[in-house]
Amino acid sequence: MCAVEMDTYEKVERALAAPLLEGSDECVGDLDAPTRDFERRELQRVRQWADDNDKRGVKEPGRGLFMLDPAVTFLAHGSYGAVSACVYNIGVEWRLLMERQPVRFFYDTLYPYIVRSLRSLAAHFGLSRASNLALVPNVEFGVQSVLRSLRLAADDLVVSWSDILYGANMHMLRVLQHEQGFQLALFPIAAHVPLTRNGPDEQDAFVEYVVAEIHNAVRTSAASQFKRVVCFFEHVSSPSAIVFPLAKLCRAFREHDVISVVDGAHALGMFAWRDTPLDAMHVDFYVTNAHKWLCNLRGAAVLYVASEEMLRQVRPLVISWGFPRGFQSSFIWTGTLDYTPFITLWAALRVFDLLGGVKNLGARNKAPRAICMTFCSRALQLKCLHSSFWTEASS
C-alpha cells in the first residue's frame, strides 16, 4: 500500500503520471481505518459468493449481488445500468463520511481516492500510467468537453453516420455546428456495417467504405480545403448494439489525418481491455460510462486523450480551481458535487474482477443469450443473426 498526501493539484498530476506498480494495490492516501475496513468487508462478501459458487460448480447470474426486483429479469444494463449492492453500500459509507466533516472531506480526503480510481482504471485499460485519463460525470460531458476544446470553425469538417447514431449525439452535433460554424457531413452506413466481430474481410470493407465517404465529403464540400477533419462515432451503437472495428477505423483515420472522437458509452465492462490496450486502438479521444456494464454508481465516466499536445488543450465544460495546473487537475474538480461515483469506481472494478471479468462473465451469459435468441426467433419467425448462437441454443 502506498500512502500519499494530495493536498495540491501538483501532487495529483505527479501521482497520475507515475508508473503503475505491478502486483500492488494503488495509492489510497490517509483515511480513517474503519472506512477502509468497510470496503474490505463488502468486497469480501462478493469474494465469498464467487468462491462458494466455484466450489459448487454453480454458474449463477449473480442476482443476489444486486438490489433488483426479484419479479423482474433485468437485461437493460446498456441503458442506466444496475448498481451492485457492494458498490452501493460502499457509496453509502463514503457519503456518510462526507457529511460528518464536509470541509475535511473535500480538502483532505477526496483527491487521493479519485487518483486511486484513475490508476485502477489505467490498469484495467492496459495502460502503463493514468496520465491520459480523467473522470467526468457522463459520456456527454466528456465528448462535448473534447469537441469544444478543439475549437472547430468554418474551415473544419466533422463527419459521422446519418442512420446509426444515437439521437442525443445527433442533437449535440447540430447544436455545435450552429454555434461553431464547422461543416457537418453525414453519410449512411447501415448497408455496410460488419455483422460479425470476427470477419476481417467484412470489417476491412467497412473501413474502406467509411474512408471513401470521408474523402467524398471533402471533395464535394464548398470549402476548397479543410484545416481539420474529425470523425465522431460510437464504438457500440445504441440500441442496435453493433460493435464497430475501433482499432481498424482509427488506424485508417490516422493514416488519412482524420481525428477520431469516439463515444464508447457501453464499452467499459464489455471488452477485455487488458488484452487489447486502449492506447493500441489508435483512437485520439475516447469516452466510456462506468454505470452500465461495470455496475458502478451513476455519475462517473472515463475520458481518454491520446496525445500530449491535446492533453494541454482539452478542458472540461466547467472551469474551476484546478484549470491552470494541468489536464487531470482541470477535470478532478469542476465545482462542489457529490464525487462518490468517482471514488467507488475502484470498488466496481474490484467486484468486476472478483466475478471473473469480461471473459468469464461473457461465457456465463452465452447460454441464456442463446436461449433468448431461440425463443425470439421462433416467436417472430426470424433467423438468428449468428448461426453459432442458433446452433448452441437449439442443441
Image: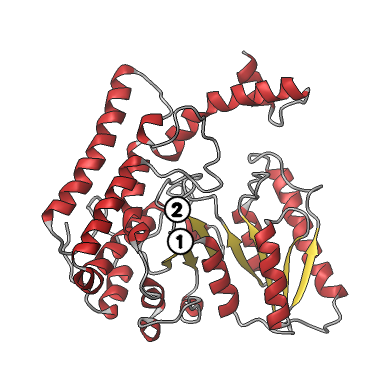
Is any part of residue 307 visible from this angle? Answer: yes
Category of crowding for the residue at label 2, using alpha-carbon neighbours closer than 10 angstroms: few (below 14), some (14–19), many (at least 20): many
* Left or right for 16, reference 234: left
Category of crowding for the residue at label 1, using alpha-carbon neighbours closer than 10 angstroms: few (below 14), some (14–19), many (at least 20): many
Question: Could you tell me which secondary element the residue under label 2 belongs to?
Answer: loop
Identity, as a three-letter code, of the amino acid under mark 2:
Ala
Q: Which residue lies most toward the bottom here?
A: 324
Residue 214 position (above or below residue 294)? below
* Left or right for 389, reference 26: right
The N terminus - image quarter? bottom left
Label 2 to label 1: alpha-carbon separation: 7 Å
Residue 356 position (above or below residue 177)? above
**Residue depicted at x 67% and y 56%:** 166
**Residue depicted at x 73% and y 53%:** 164
Q: Are marks 2 and 1 in contact (CB under 8 Å)?
A: yes
Where is mark 1, residue-wise?
302
**Residue depicted at x 64% and y 51%:** 245
* Left or right for 367, reference 162: left
Identity, as a three-letter code, of the amino acid under mark 1:
Val
Where is mark 2, residue-wise?
290
Task: Please tell me which residue lies in front, 101 or 230.
Answer: 101
Q: How many marks?
A: 2
Is any part of residue 227 visible from this angle? Answer: no
The C terminus - image quarter? top right
x, y percent for residue 231: 68, 67
* Left or right for 203, reference 288: right
x, y percent for residue 159: 73, 67
x, y percent for residue 197: 64, 41
Say which label, 2 or 1, has the lower sequence index.
Answer: 2
